[in-house]
């Protein structure tokens, strides 16, 4: 058993029975569920809009290279510089060059899972560059020395009391501070950071090919501040975020908002097409767009699993997943958690290391049901499992399965072992693997067929030999 799998099993058991954690998640998820139902009510035909958005994303992936080149051409004409990164290391090398060129000492960041993917914060801090997260949830987990817990809601695992205690410890704010007071405290603290930052770094929800724009949607205005004050704007975006046309946002933005936060539309939706132009007073003097591959092209080569590249990172599949809701985001030990993370992480970070995540699912299908781009996530998890089995053939397991198959196909062998023997056997075989909180299944002393035959015999005798 690999180290990652061992850690996953241990942490899953610990979190599943952490009452405080489950209570916090249950409360925060309940707020989302209420907003989610309201958000979906804006669509008169939800399935039609989901199919429309799914078609847009699949069209983009069919001609991936064409649309990416179109994006590069368009945004370059507006003065931005496009840099391609095959992996995290190349992306960080581009970042280093930009920081050195502009003598950067402080960076402000808006929320970005792509930067988490390449572990940008730790890299910049190692280079003695101050990094400040400006999304409230991201700022909370940064102060706590943690990573985002959820794709959309980074601090979902913390209650308001947890945050008040955290800020009291780090900033000496009153322990009884309300969420509104803490938000105001952070807002005032970040104002100074925005105005003194050398570089602003964002992700990007979408890359719009026909107009050459990075589309960014957020609720706090920190994305706009991150790009408005610093003289340099760097956008780090996965290449799968490409969409063909500006008009596609008419369908994608409301769908993302409704599934992500339950809103009709997110508060701030912006398009960045390059640095400020001649005669303009607002905006950065330089803009760089780093297009990150980091396993995406490899996933694209798999005809079925490549459907996961259509994901728009709304987080809806995490919110309905019974496994995620019990074990939490950190247990996955990967940037992307929940059902979508379990599908893509093995392909991004090494199948041999993270293939166990594909088994972290009940296959209930709820993730597929809520997906706004109609990704059949539970089917993709099964395909990952199939690949895991094919890549890791175990002769002992194969022989055991052959034996099990033979036994299940022959009634004699199913009836041959008494139930009391099977009860002892299963406890012996599964000792230490079943979990200390779960009861072992208990087999009857006789099989169903034996009990049925016995009942039929009694029935026959009670009816003077006449069968009924």
Image: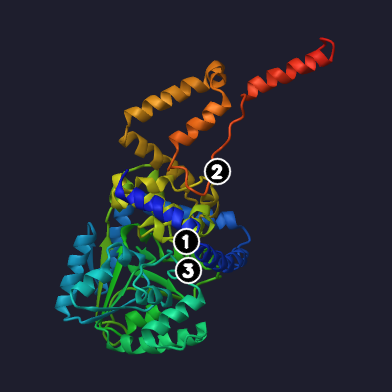
Q: Residues within 10 Å of mark 1 (few under 14, many from 20)?
A: many
| Residue at the far right in the pictured view | 464
Question: Relative to 150, does residue 346 appear above or below in the rendering?
Answer: above
CA separation in Å, label 2 and label 1? 33 Å
Residue at which label 3 appears = 156
Which is in the foreground here, disc 2 or disc 3?
2
Spot occupied by residue 206 in the image (x, y as percentages of width and height): 38, 64
Location of the N terminus by quadrant is top left
Mark 2 vs mark 3, CA separation in Å: 31 Å
Residue 5 drawn above or below residue 211: above
| Residue 14 occupies quadrant | bottom left
Q: Which corner quadrant holds the C terminus?
A: top right
Closest to the observer, 86 or 69: 86
> Tag 1, which secondary structure?
loop
Between 244 and 110, the residue placed more toward the observer is 110
Residue 315: assigned label: 1
| Residue 108 in picture, x, y percent from top left | 30, 79
Q: Which residue is mark 2?
A: 439
State the residue in front, 2 or 257: 2
In this picture, residue 286 sits left or right of residue 377: left
Residue 461 x %, y %: 80, 13
Q: Which mark is residue 141?
A: none
Left or right of 68: which side holds 414?
right
Q: Please report the residue visible at 32 percent of the width from the left and 51 percent of the height from the top.
A: 4
């Amino acid at each position: 058993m690999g180290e990652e799998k061992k850690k996953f099993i241990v942490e899953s058991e610990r979190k599943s029975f952490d009452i405080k954690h489950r209570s916090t998640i249950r409360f925060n998820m309940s707020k989302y569920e209420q907003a989610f139902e309201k958000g979906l009510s804006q669509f008169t035909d939800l399935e039609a809009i989901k199919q429309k958005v799914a078609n847009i994303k699949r069209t983009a992936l069919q001609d991936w290279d064409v649309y990416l080149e179109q994006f590069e051409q368009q945004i370059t004409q507006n003065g931005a510089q496009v840099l391609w990164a095959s992996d995290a290391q190349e992306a960080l090398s581009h970042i280093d060059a930009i920081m050195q060129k502009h003598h950067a000492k402080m960076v402000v960041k808006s929320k970005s899972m792509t930067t988490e993917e390449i572990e940008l914060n730790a890299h910049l801090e190692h280079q003695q560059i101050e990094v400040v997260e400006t999304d409230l949830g991201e700022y909370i987990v940064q102060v706590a020395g943690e990573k985002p817990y959820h794709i959309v809601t980074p601090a979902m695992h913390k209650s308001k009391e947890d945050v008040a205690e955290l800020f009291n410890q780090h900033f000496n704010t009153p322990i009884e501070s309300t969420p509104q007071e803490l938000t105001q405290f952070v807002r005032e603290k970040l104002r100074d950071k925005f105005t003194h930052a050398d570089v602003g770094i964002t992700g990007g929800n979408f890359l719009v090919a026909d107009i050459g724009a990075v589309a960014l949607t957020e609720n706090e205005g920190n994305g706009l501040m991150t790009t408005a004050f610093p003289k340099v704007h760097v956008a780090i975006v996965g290449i799968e975020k490409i969409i063909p046309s500006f008009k596609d946002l008419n369908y994608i933005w409301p769908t993302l908002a409704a599934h992500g936060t339950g809103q009709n539309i997110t508060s701030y939706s912006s398009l960045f097409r390059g640095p400020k132009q001649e005669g303009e007073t607002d905006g950065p003097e330089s803009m760089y767009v780093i297009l990150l591959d980091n396993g995406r092209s490899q996933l694209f080569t798999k005809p079925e699993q490549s459907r996961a590249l259509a994901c728009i990172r709304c987080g809806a599949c995490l919110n309905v997943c019974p496994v995620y809701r019990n074990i939490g985001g950190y247990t996955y030990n990967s940037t992307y958690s929940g059902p979508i993370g379990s599908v893509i992480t093995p392909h991004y970070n090494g199948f041999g290391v993270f293939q166990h995540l594909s088994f972290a699912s009940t296959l209930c299908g709820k993730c597929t049901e809520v997906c706004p781009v109609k990704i059949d996530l539970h089917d993709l998890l099964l395909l990952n499992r199939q690949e895991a089995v094919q890549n890791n053939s175990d002769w002992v397991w194969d022989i055991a399965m052959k034996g099990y198959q033979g036994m299940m196909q022959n009634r004699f062998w199913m009836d041959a072992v008494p139930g009391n023997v099977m009860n002892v056997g299963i406890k012996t075989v599964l000792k230490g693997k079943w979990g200390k909180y779960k009861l072992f299944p208990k087999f009857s002393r006789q099989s169903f067929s034996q009990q049925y035959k016995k009942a039929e015999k009694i029935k026959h005798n009670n009816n003077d030999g006449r069968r009924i």
